Amino acid sequence: MTDDGAGEIDLRRKGSIDRVLAPGQPRRQRLRGFDDEYADIVDYIIRCTHRIWEELGVGLIYTHYRHNSVIHAGNDDVYGREAVVANTLQTLAAFPDRKLYGDDVIWSGDDEAGFHTSHHLTTVGRNTGHSAYGPPTGRKLSWRSIAHCVVLENEIVEEWLLRDEIAVVRQLGLDEQVLAAARARSDLERGASVLAVGPVERGLGQLAPQPLSPASTGGDTGFDPADFVRRTLHDVWNRRLLNLLRASYDESYRGRYPSGRRFAGPGDLAVFVLGLLAAFPDAKVTTEHLMWLGDGRGGYRVAVRWRFDGTHEGHGEWGPPSGARVRMLGLSHLRVVGGRIAEESTLFDEFALLTQVWAARLAAGTEPARTD
């Protein structure tokens, strides 16, 4: 965690990308081992993203990713920067006019232990080349992504990367169920393990899920945004205390979730949480990493990396119960104002969820009949 660093680029106030990427900016933060052109860690993330994707400087990956870097993308792990280069080339070939709009960068750490950064961005591009989903459609797409990186001495060492995959699939004019079934079948045929194993443990044995131990208060304000967000996620998702949503989320709350979902007010969010828990009644959410920027006067920007584990034993929008034991990576950006969550932008790999559900169906020979 950290407060707003002096001189940090504020993407909401800085304005034009010409000013954000203006050359010759003085160094505003200690960056041992980083290229001289970077003013601070936010500048590093925004500038190298622009240079690689929009200026097509793909070879910069060799100086900005460690040779043995690990990229966690949904349920797939990619090892080594050569794989990063290959994936970047393939994505650019599919969307050669791709524009990446940096919405926010939340960070923590330093140049000794390494920085954690969470980069929320919106991508716009036209599909004029071949992609993993087939030949070009000519369609113009827009999707959200969040990239959580660990950075040390100018190199990304590890990255957790999500994009709104089903939104991409639907905008291409394709059927996510058909594609997920085909992906699951291919994985099973080549012997890949696509299903998580073991029980989901929200508590010990038959005991109920316990509340989290209280954390220390948050400095001068007496409010700890990390403790608040961690406790809220645990109470709502793991302890099933959905009655706390109205106390923890502002009445004017606005949320963006995968597959184009938009929520207005905590009531909308409650409906979604109920649907997901009904389909995965043993579900557990684990907070893996959390960081924040801000103060009690202007509010806090909080980035969370989390995991969802559950067993598909209930009915819902993901089809009849399949028995699939699923695991999903999740990334969230929250804005906390006045002790409540006012805005949220969350991504999880819903396409990976569908693939795991279909893998369980295919393995058990219980594939449901198509109705269209």
Image (tube, helix red, strand yellow):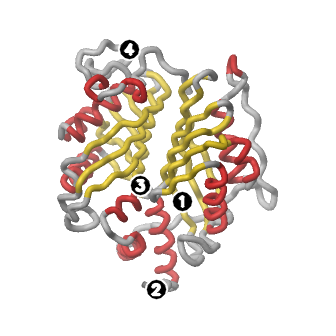
Quadrant in the rendering for residue 190:
bottom left
> Mark 2 = which residue?
371
Count neighbours of disc 2 (C-alpha within 10 A) and say few if under 14, some if 14 to 19, many if 20 or more. few
Q: Nearer the viewer, mark 4 or mark 1?
A: 4
Instruction: Give the residue displayed 23% in from the left and 54% down from the top.
Output: 126
On residue 28, which mark appears?
Answer: 4
Amino acid type, callout 1 = Arg
Marks 2 and 4: which is nearer the front? 2
Could you tell me residue 230's position as x and y percent?
65, 40
Q: Residue drawn 65% across and 46% down?
A: 233
Using residue 219 as the reference point, say whether residue 348 is left or right of it.
left
- Earlier sequence position, callout 2 versus callout 1: 1
Visible in this render: residue 175?
Answer: yes
Instruction: Indicate the position of residue 97 as horizontal and vertical percent values.
Output: 20, 48
Mark 3 vs mark 1, foreground winner is 3
Q: Quarter of the image containing the C terminus?
A: bottom left
| Cα–Cα gap, marks 4 and 1 | 40 Å
Q: Are marks 3 and 1 in contact (CB under 8 Å)?
A: no
User: Which part of the image, by quadrant, shows the N terminus?
Assistant: top right
Which one is earlier in the sequence, the residue at label 4 or at label 3? Answer: 4
Q: Does residue 161 appear left or right of residue 261 in this picture?
A: left
Could you tell me how far apart the alpha carbons at marks 2 and 4 are, in whole angstroms?
Answer: 59 Å
**Marks 2 and 1, Cα distance to the nearest angstrom?**
28 Å
Amino acid tagged 4: Arg
Mark sitting earlier along the chain (2/3): 3
The correct choice, above or below, for 297 with respect to 232 in the image is above
Q: What secondary structure is found at the residue carrying circle 4?
A: loop
Q: Contact (CB < 8 A) between labels 2 and 4?
A: no
Disc number for residue 327 = 1
Q: Earlier in the sequence, mark 4 or mark 1?
A: 4
Pointer 3 residue = 164
